[in-house]
Amino acid sequence: MDSVTRTEADETLLEVRDLRTYFHTRAGTARAVDGVSLRVERGESLGLVGESGCGKTMTALSVMALVPSPPGEVLPGSSIRFKGEELVGAAEARLRRMRGNEVSMIFQEPMTSLNPVHSVGSQVVEALRLHRGLRGREAAAAAVELFAEVRLPDPEVRFGEYPHQLSGGMRQRVMIAMALSCKPQLLIADEPTTALDVTTQAQILDLLSDLRQRRSMAVLLISHDLGVVSAFCDRVSVMYAGQIVEEGSAEEVFHHPRHPYTQGLLASLPGRHSRGTRLPVIPGVAPSPTLWPHGCRFHERCPLVMDRCAKDAPDLLPVAGSDRTARCWLESPESAAAREDTRA
Amino acid sequence: MIAGEAEVLLEVMDLSMHFSARDGAWGRVRGLVKAVDGISFTIRRGETLGLVGESGCGKSTTARSLLRLLEPTGGRVLFDGVDVLSMDARTLRAFRGRAQIVFQDPFGSLNPRSTAGGMLEEALEVHHLAGDATGRGRRAVELLELVGLRAEHAGRYPHEFSAGQRQRLGIARALSVEPEFIVLDEAVSALDVSVQAQILNLLSDLKADLGLAYLFIAHDLAVVEHLCDRVAVMYLGKIVETGPAERLYRAPRHPYTKALLSAVPSLDAKFESGHERIMLTGDPPSPMNPPSGCVFHPRCSHPKKDEACRRDMPDLADCGEGCFVACIKERSRLGGGA
């Protein structure tokens, strides 16, 4: 991939480079995020997929500067740029302004992020007061307007209700309303529909894509659900063992995966095609963040493993003939040449 | 259909589980929650029935009532021809040796202070299986190996296992009593995709090797399509459609089944033309205050929906090819129905 020129960088909303977030625990240092680079352009939706413990959520929390420290630490040399401005090492006041006004985040279980003893209306009013300086009737009117925007039925009635009176889908709508209160340019959604039923999930995803278009807001969607990411995102980054292993357009990655991990993950999805058959399975178990394997972190489970995989760790290599990347030696020029030879 | 000719193992008739809702433990009764409201289905030997539907539709309550972990308030359950609901304590224990359940969260259903081997041996002892202590120890190791764990795992405690291994252990414990029937209540729902695939393969293998019948409860429709022979769709305590899995997924008839299937985000949906998405409005109504007539009518988008739907709750009607649907409009479309 070409080196990023200045003009391109100016256009990029979020650019994460070589992010390393480690946790120092008694069991050793957990390298939860270990050299992640990703970018989100204005108005774009990027999906971050991977299985439990691969570092998706820690990547998002690092961007929000919400990693608990200690035991967590964003290592020097990591870079998180928002509209060109470096956020790693920035003053707390600057970070608070970023979190309040430019970047918002919603989580999987809205019940744990809402205060059970305040009405949902007053919680959104609070956000409006802090971020937009609105008061009194003005703030209440803006909150009701936000409730209408996230398609809560009877927004005036909902205003006075408490979290436990709302369904899971409605609570997530309240969270989205709160996240929108500061007019963010980037919304980080961490498993926003995982706790919801499939028909409610469809409603929330539909709402998010509508809001994204109307507000030209970029979305970083974190999910373990490949179907959700495929339906919602323009581009996708696949994470494994603290690293991005493949990145590209959602269509290309899901329909022509290059990295053996992505291929294995997609093949193990059950459905119509797999009825009456055994599912192809990725052998072994996911490694522990205190003990990532040497060389390529997937090599012990990879069906296409080669000698060099155990010794040298591959970088994200460009996939010939497309604008995506895969962290796999099969994409190296030598391997590509060897494939050409066997074909010839 | 492999199970087409096999004998019926479980027959559920008009099963109901109504709870009274109170204001606090001693408060007055405010109403009746009809969690399960008159449902019927059968499972043949070696067959897998999928029970799908959204949170609160009564799937898990159905499973718990038919195993008598809850005492159902109405209906009949026949297991191998014997009435489960009238069993005394002794016959009930024998029944539990033939019908088992595996839950979603294995960590919550495994004793944290018992080793893997210890809990398997305890189950064997309670059911007087595998002879003496040595025999039980040997059988425990066999069970661990049957589910893809190893002998050395026998001495480990639940917290020392990964989520996938814990679910294997939960399955091993269910298998310890050599059941003919296992309820799998969201048994793979909490697992990562790659681990889920391993457990699904294990379930298929066990079914093939031991001739087990499953009631497979899940909210993930793709998993159900992969594993199940037949599927029943629940909404608000009632079964609204049932049929062979292949048929039901290909051509759903009930408007709720159609909406449910179309809401699943599939990898191909976005790039496929002609994938019609039906967006349901609102949330499911409360089972304490269900709508009149057809329980689905307030959210239904059937073009012919009318007064009759608001008035009458349709029964399941035979619409051929082993399919049954509880929708007046679909029944009339088929020319009078049953």
Image: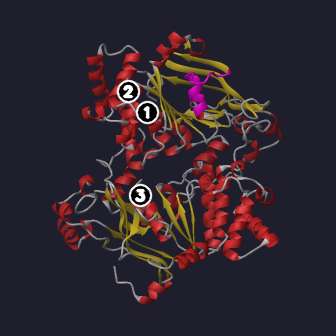
Marker disc for residue B119: 2
Q: Which residue type carries mark 3?
A: Gly
Q: Which residue is drawn at 42% across and 48% down?
A: B192
Does residue B305 lie above or below A246 as drawn?
above
Q: Which residue is drawn at 38% across and 53% down?
A: A265
Letter of the chain that mark 2 sits on in the rendering: B
Q: Is residue B69 magenta?
A: yes
Letter of the chain that mark 3 sits on in the rendering: A
Q: Are marks 2 and 1 in contact (CB under 8 Å)?
A: yes
Q: Mark 1 points at which residue?
A: B110
Q: Is residue A160 magenta?
A: no
Q: Mark 3 points at which residue?
A: A50
Q: Where is residue A190 in the image (x, y as percent from the top left)?
A: 52, 60
SS at circle 1:
loop
Q: Which residue type carries mark 1?
A: Leu
Task: Using the rendered view, name the quadrant where residue B83 is placed.
Answer: top right
Task: Using the rendered view, name the quadrant where residue A326 is placed.
Answer: bottom left
